[in-house]
Amino acid sequence: GAGVSQSPSNKVTEKGKDVELRCDPISGHTALYWYRQRLGQGLEFLIYFQGNSAPDKSGLPSDRFSAERTGESVSTLTIQRTQQEDSAVYLCASSSYRAETQYFGPGTRLLVL
Amino acid sequence: QQQVKQSPQSLIVQKGGISIINCAYENTAFDYFPWYQQFPGKGPALLIAIRPDVSEKKEGRFTISFNKSAKQFSLHIMDSQPGDSATYFCAPKRRGFKTIFGAGTRLFVKA
């Protein structure tokens, strides 16, 4: 069966531009997470969607970051006016409410020049 | 009460040796205690997980030990192999809430 997919796999942008990162979770998974991982570092929580509940946005580092999710399907993470410190791998994961195991996508590698 | 402390930060083990990684947490409401394994260039993947109603779970060479009173759980890798070289993360959580990952442990197994 299909796993979590993310697009694009790589993105190079110029400082100040906006970028959109997409995540397609596993079908039927009610929970969706976004994380940021800088080179050689751990996973930094960004945002968590659970079903129709209000998302937990407590990890978003600034108001330049936002995310949306349509129902229990696709999610988009938007970074406005990108900065060089936004360069990182952005990982998406999904899980079912009952099983809780997170299944990660391959990530989007963002480089801001 | 979301703090998660993982140790050591890095670990070098000889092939065939035992690797031990520890995770301490504060939130007593956590009810799911997983370890994730991440290889370079890949997303993390679940390695092994435990619920708080048992104190130990073994899957092949991997064992997770859980100490509820001490609010700690650990990962033991027996007969460590070079292919186990990866970064390991603990990620205790409570159902319906976000996950906070530990800082990670870089394991290198020398051949």
Image: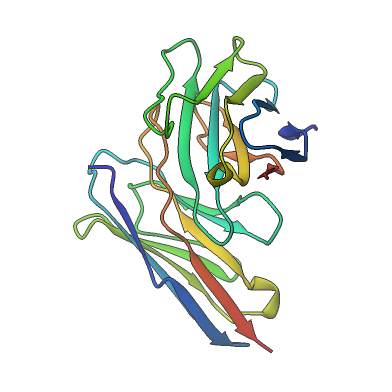
Q: Quarter of the image containing the C terminus of chain A?
A: top right
Q: Residue furthest right?
A: A1
Vertical order, A109 against B9 (above or below): above
Along the line of sight, which residue is nearer the eye, B100 or A19? A19
The spot of residue A84 in percent (x, y) is 58, 45
Q: Residue at x 56, y 42 (%)?
A: A86
| Percent coordinates x, y for residue A29 in the rendering | 61, 24
Q: Is residue B69 left or right of residue A47?
A: left
Query: A24 and B68: which one is in front?
Result: A24
Q: How is the image coloured?
A: rainbow
Position in image of residue B90 (x %, y %): 44, 55
Residue lying farthest left? B69
Residue located at (45% from left, 39% from top): A45
Does residue A24 appear anywhere in the picture? no
Tally the numbered discs.
0
Q: Quadrant of the N terminus of chain A?
A: top right
* Residue A29 versus residue B52 in the image, above or below: above
Pick whichever, B22 or A39, lies toward us.
A39
The residue shown at (34%, 58%) is B55
Residue B108, compared with residue B22, is above or below; it is: below
Q: Is any atom of residue B90 visible in this view?
A: yes
Residue B40: percent from the left, percent from the top? 68, 61
Judge left or right: residue A29 versus residue B18. right
Which of the 4 image quadrants contains residue A7? top right
- Identified at 63% across, 21% down, the residue is A75
Work out whether residue B56 or residue A101 is closer to the camera in this orientation and state it.
Answer: A101
Q: Residue A12 occupies which quadrant of the picture?
A: top right
Relative placement, left or right, of B42 versus A36 is right
